[in-house]
Amino acid sequence: MEKRRDSKKITKHTKEVTSLEDTTLELRKKFTLKYAELVKYFPKIPEIASREFAFLFWDRNYMIRHRGFTNPQHLLSELKNINPKHVYHSAALYKDPANKIMSEKGWMGCDFVVDIDADHMELSCQENHDYYICMKCDYVHREKVTKCQKCEGPIRKQIWLCDKCLEASKYEVIKLVDDFLPDFGFTKNDIDLNFSGHRGYHVHLRDKFIRTLSSEERRQMVDYITGTNFDPTDYLIYKSSNGYFIGTTIDDAGWKGRIARNFLKILTTHDSIDSFNKEYSKYNLDTKIKQILLNPDNRNQLIHQLTIKNQYWTIKELAKGSWKKIKEFLIQVSMCDIDVPVSIDTHRLIRVQGSIHGKTGFLVKPLNYYDMVNFEPFSDPIIFSTEKEACMKLEINTPICPEIRIKDIIYGPYKKHEQIEVPEAVAIFLTCKGVADLLSRGN
Ligand SMILES: [Zn+2]
Ligand SMILES: [Zn+2]
């Protein structure tokens, strides 16, 4: 895709809107008008009458929850009336969802929800775009800090999103759906999926049986998906007496096959340490081990053993300690990186599909599996205008504002006090992110 860089800056302007309250009020109006348009396309919320709804607002720092809606029209007219910034509903179903006392709601079951989000992943791009900024002296910290290293002032975490974060999230969703859910008997057609509106995706399983699972039972599923405590004693072990590693074969079920298939894929894809490091440097596998594995003779031998489904993996130079590290590496590479607390909580609130994310202005877009594979997170969920005619004027209020791609144009990076004129969708993104104040209302 060809990306253009937008460098339009304002030299003169009339300050029509100045304070933070005004920016917030404008965003609220924009969201309300957009909800009026979205009514026609609002996706169906399964069992809407049995779900608790909750809202966060532009001008209040507390959540309103324990709301119930008997039908979609009721919810949509409420969205237009109360102008929320964020909209959530319970993953659980209740007899009396609006009851304020949790124990009296009458829990009837809970969807199994998987939240896959770059927030919970360690990605190299985050060093380039996530910051801890002092609210007193503007000092920018790249490392996580709880107070300013310079003046001890309070810290504001500024997290961003880029193609790499969203690609990493999508990769994990594909892994979950293609590789893990079949182990539980679910296919692509059994899932409900949506873009989160920010840095990831939500996968919902609404199967009758899965809804009855307790939190502990859900934890067992999550441990399986994340490879937690996975430490087999009869395979993936080194036999010192014979000098071979008891591996697994690509046709094995579950984790056994997963490990062998991933090992084969890694070895066939990478024939040099440079190439290997491009994908796997974060796993810190010893250089010595990489040299041995990727030495052409060893690599070919292992590829051969894996291809002919030989359970015994033999490389002379690799002893017990090295095989243990390879095993740990293969488990790390094969696990699925999900936000664990979301999946085990049977009373969790989750963002409503079809709503607008208050930190980006992006649509929380429902997708089927195939839509998701081709989904363009910086184009497809953009619901505000990207036309030049709908430009708005802003002033950047943060010491460091990274670049952002909206559709095929890159905006920024910007400096503090820089005044810019950008399309509505970009203006809403930057103001929702809290890094800019509006100077004009746009059209
Ligand atoms: Zn400071
Ligand atoms: Zn990123």
Image: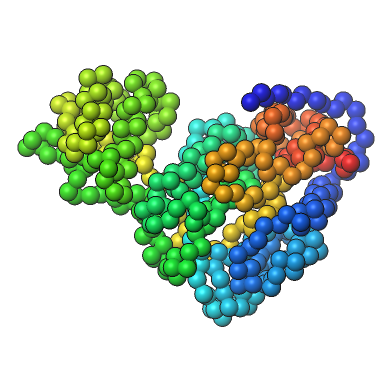
**359 with respect to 142 (left or right):** right
Residue located 60% across and 49% down the image: 367
Closer to the camera in the image, 300 or 169: 300
Tally of marks: 0
Closer to the camera in the image, 83 or 400: 83
Residue located 37% across and 34% down the image: 283
Answer with the quarter of the image where residue 298 lies.
Answer: top left
Residue 412 screen position, x and y as percent: 71, 29
Residue located 87% across and 34% down the image: 389
**417 with respect to 354 (left or right):** right
**286 with respect to 100 (left or right):** left
Instruction: Say if 129 sits above or below 186 in the image.
Output: above
Q: Residue furthest left?
A: 241
Q: Residue furthest bottom?
A: 104
**Quarter of the image where the C terminus is located:** top right
Instruction: Say if 133 sits above or below 40 in the image.
Output: above
Instruction: Say if 402 sits above or below 23 in the image.
Output: above
Residue 289 screen position, x and y as percent: 26, 27
**296 with respect to 46 (left or right):** left
Q: Is residue 431 at least partly visible in the picture?
A: no
Residue located 70% across and 34% down the image: 406
Q: Is residue 224 at least partly visible in the picture?
A: yes
Residue 155 screen position, x and y as percent: 62, 44
Residue 337 screen position, x and y as percent: 44, 46
**Quarter of the image where the N terminus is located:** top right
